[in-house]
Amino acid sequence: MAQLIDGRLVSKKICENLSDEILFLSKKPCLAVIIVGEDPASRIYVNLKRKKAQELGIKSIVEQMPTATSQQELLNKIEQLNNDNEVNAILVQLPLPSHIDTKAVLEKINPLKDVDCFHPYNMGRIATGTKPYVYPCTPKGIIRLLEYYNIPPQGKHAVVIGRSNIVGRPVAQMLLNENATVTICHSKTANLAEITKTADILISAVGQKNLVKPDMVKEGVVVIDVGMNRTDEGKLCGDVDFYGVEPKASFITPVPGGVGPMTICSLMQNTFDLYNIQYNS
Ligand code: GUN
C-alpha cells in the first residue's frame, strides 16, 4: 500500500507560515490577476486565488476584461501594472481567447513581477540551471511535496508525461537541476508504457483520465498526478487510475487533495517572495 502524499496538509503548513509573516508587514504584498473572457473554469480558479490571497492578508486586484479585448489593450493593461509600484506580482490567467498571442502577452510582463514564471527570461534561467526570481507554481508545489516526504530526486529516473510550458517542461528541468535522470514523454511518444515502467518518480500532467494504468508502473514507484479531469459521474479525477496503481506505488498523490492545493499555495508564496525581492534588494 502506498503512502498518500497529502497536499492539503503540506499547503496548509506553508500557508500558515506565510500568513504569520505577512501579519507583521505594515504594507501588504499585492497580486494582480488579469482574466480575459468568460471561461467558467478560469473564473473559478481566479476566485479561488482571490479568496486565498484574502485569507493570507495578500492584497489582490482582479482585472476582468471582455472576450473582445484586443491584444494591444491587454498589452497596455500589463504595461500599466508593470509600472504600478503598488503591484508586486502579475498573473494573466490562461487560456486567453484565440485571437490573442499568448507568448507576446507573457513576454510583456516584467520578469520581476512574473509570479507564474512564464516569461522566457525566468523559464530560460531554469533551463540553464540558474535561479529565476520565482519558480512556476505547480512544479514548485511538486518539488515541495517531494521534499516534505523525503523523496530526493537525485539519481532517480523521473518520467514526466506532458510537455506543457505550465507543468511538463519546467518540472522536468527542475528535476534535472535536482540531479534526477529525466525523460519527457508526450502525445507522440512511442511505447509510453515501456518508458513509464522504468520510472522511479512518475509525473503525469496531461489531462486525460485513466491514462496511467497499473501495468504501466513498477513496484515502488512514486506517483505525482497533476491531471484535473472529471469522471463520467462528474467527480474530479486525475490522469492516474488511482485504485489500480496505488497498491504498486510507494507514494501517490490523490486527486483532489494532492498537487492542486500546492499550486495556489506556491502562488501566494511567490507573491510574497516577489514583494521581498522588490522591497529588500
Ligand atoms: N491556467 C491553468 N493553470 C494556470 C496557471 O498556473 N497560471 C495561469 N496564469 N493560468 C493557468
Image (cartoon, rainbow, N blue to C red):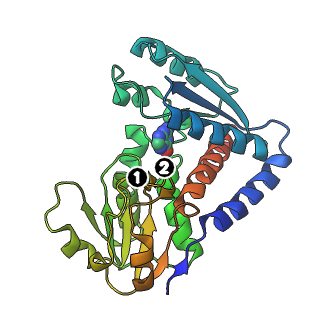
Of all residues shown, which one is farthest toward the front? 233
Q: Is residue 191 above or below residue 269?
A: below
The residue lying at 76 percent from left, 59 percent from top is 17
Q: Nearer the viewer, residue 219 or 58?
A: 219
Residues packed near mark 1 inside 10 Å, few (<14), some (14 to 19) or many (20 plus): many
Amino acid tagged 1: Val
Residue 276 position in % (x across, y down):
68, 44
Residue 16 position in % (x across, y down):
77, 58
Q: Is mark 1 within 8 Å of ligand 1?
A: no
Residue 225 position in % (x across, y down):
44, 64
Q: Nearer the viewer, residue 270 or 200?
A: 200
Q: Is residue 66 above or below residue 239?
A: above
Q: Which residue is mark 1?
A: 167
Amino acid tagged 2: Pro
Residues packed near mark 2 inside 10 Å, few (<14), some (14 to 19) or many (20 plus): many
Q: Which mark is residue 136?
A: 2
Q: Is mark 2 within 8 Å of ligand 1?
A: yes
